[in-house]
Amino acid sequence: MAGHSHSANIAVRKGKQDSQRAKLFSKLGRYIMVAAKNGGGDPVTNLRLRYAIDKARSVSMPKEKIERAVLKGTGELEGELLEETIYEGYGPGGVAIMVEALTDNRARTSGDVRVIFEKNGGNMGLPGCVGYMFDRKGLIVLDAKAYPDEDAVMTAALEAEAEDFKKVDDVYEIITDATKFLNVSQSLTDAGYEALESEVKQLAKAPTDVEVEIGRKIVKLLDALDNNEDVQNVFSTAIITEAMSQ
C-alpha cells in the first residue's frame, strides 16, 4: 500500500530538535514531572510515566535527570507547578496547527504563543477551532527494509490490537488507539521489532499538500513554536517535505 507518510513530517524536523539537546531534556523533564504527579512515580503502574521515561531514554537523557524529574513530580523534591494546555490556530496557507504545552504561567505562555503565530504569518484561534481536524493516536514506525516480510509485521501489529497498518515508501506505519499505544508498542518490541519512531501524536485527519514557499513559512512557524520552552509538541495538517526545511 502507498499513501501519505505521517512519519515523514516528523523526520523532516527531528534533526533540528535533536540538535538542541539541553532544551529537549528540559521539555522531557517537565513531561515526566506531570506524568508522575498525575499517576504516581511507578512506571509499572503509571503507563503515561513509562512512556515519558521511554521517550527520554530514546534520546539518551541522563538517568539522574530522569530520576530527578520523577521525584519532583511526586513531590519528593521541590519542583514547578505545571499544567497542561493546548493552543490551536492557523498557519500560512490556512493550515491547521495544534500546540501542546506545559506551563507554570498560562497567561505568559498564551501571550508568547500568540505572538509567535502573529510574527510568522499565522494567528491563534479559539479552543476547538482546529482540534476536530486531528486524531490523537499512537504512531509506530518500522524500517521495512529491516523487516521485509510485510505480512508477518502486519499480523503482529493487528494481533497486538493496532488500529491500522500500512507501508509507505520504505517504512511501515502502525496506528494505535492512544490508550493502547504502550501495549501495542511493547508487543511489537517483544516480537523482535525495533521502532524507528514510536510516539503518541495529533495526526491530521486530512493532510494537506502545500506549495514549497508556503511550506517553508509553515516550517518557520512550527520551529518558532517548538523553540518556546513551554511548548512540548507542535502538529499541523500540512504535508512537509525536505525541500521545505531548507
Image (spheres, grey):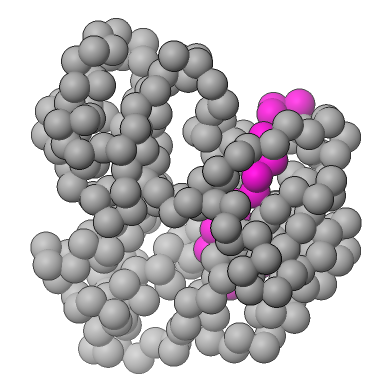
Closest to the observer: 5 or 37?
Answer: 5
**Looking at the rendering, in which quadrant would you find the C terminus?**
top right
Quarter location, residue 116: bottom right
Q: Would residue 96 appear left or right of 105 to someone viewing this image?
A: right
Label count reads: 0
Q: Residue furthest front?
A: 132
Residue 181 visible in the shown view: yes
Q: Would residue 7 appear left or right of 105 to someone viewing this image?
A: left
State the extent of the magenta-drawn residues as a range: 227-243
Which residue is at a point 39% across and 23% down the rendered structure image? 166
Image position of 196 with respect to 230: above or below? above
Which residue is at a point 55% across and 43% down the rendered structure image? 205
Q: Estimate the x, y position of residue 148 in percent, counting from the top left.
A: 29, 8
Q: Estimate the x, y position of residue 72 in percent, counting from the top left.
A: 32, 82
Closest to the observer: 165 or 145?
Answer: 165
Which residue is at a point 46% across and 84% down the rendered structure image? 82
Q: Would residue 149 appear left or right of 167 to someone viewing this image?
A: left
Q: Would residue 188 appear left or right of 6 to someone viewing this image?
A: left
Residue 229 visible in the shown view: no
Q: Estimate the x, y position of residue 161 in percent, counting from the top left.
A: 20, 39
**Looking at the rendering, in which quadrant would you find the N terminus?**
top left
Q: Estimate the x, y position of residue 16 in percent, counting from the top left.
A: 62, 44
Q: Does residue 233 show up magenta in the picture?
A: yes
Image position of 46 with respect to 167: above or below? below
Q: Does residue 138 show up magenta in the picture?
A: no
Which residue is at a point 50% across and 16% down the rendered structure image? 2
